[in-house]
Amino acid sequence: TEETLILVKPDGVARGLTGEVLRRIEAKGYKIVDLRMVNASRELLEEHYEEHAGKPFFGPLVEFMASGPVVAVRASGNRVIEGFRSLAGATDPTVAAPGTIRGDLGRDWGAAVTQNIVHGSDSTLSAERELALWFA
Ligand code: ATP
């Protein structure tokens, strides 16, 4: 079955939402196969976000992701990549639908970077690439 990389970002960890995110993953029926708390290096984060290199929010995004520990989760299940993206909701927490992680728990804090609690791989290719990075 399929696997994906989920990150509880520094804002989610700092706000004590790790358990709530894990609860939603498990309540949906996905399996948590591996889990680790990481103080990510800038090198790791720049590689993780390589598709955004050169965008105006790239530097602030890497700094934000390095600002505190993140919880990396290897989750598995049928169509878990698409399924977790659906649980997470839209990138912008202000417009993310209620019922989603970002819609229920996130809002716009006026920061340079959208602090939206979680990351989830967006394709089988990025899931493979990202899992190799975070669970080397
Ligand atoms: P993720 O990949 O983290 O699940 P996503 O796929 O919804 O989120 P991407 O477009 O891949 O969003 O952007 C990666 C992350 O960069 C976002 O989750 C957000 O934290 C930040 N981000 C994206 N766009 C912006 C923006 N225009 N301004 C500030 N931060 C942004």
Image (cartoon, grey):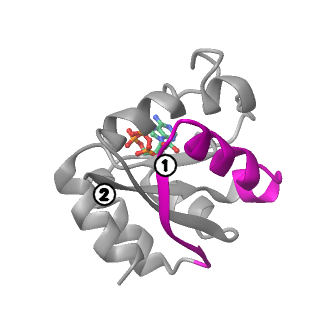
Across and down, in percent, residue 49 comes to 36, 59
| Residue designated by label 2 | 53
Q: Residue at x 24, y 55 (%)?
A: 126
The answer to whether residue 113 shows anywhere in this view is no
The amino acid marked with disc number 1 is: His
| Residue designated by label 1 | 119
Confirm if mark 1 falls within 8 A of ligand 1: yes
Across and down, in percent, residue 107 comes to 72, 28
Q: What count of labels does the image hold?
A: 2
Front one among 116 and 135: 135
Q: Quadrant of residue 103?
A: top right
Q: Range of the magenta residues?
A: 12-39
Q: Residue at x 58, y 15 (%)?
A: 97
Q: Quadrant of residue 40?
A: bottom right
Of marks 2 and 1, which one's residue comes earlier in the chain? 2
Front one among 67 and 2: 2
Q: CA distance from mark 2 to mark 1?
A: 17 Å
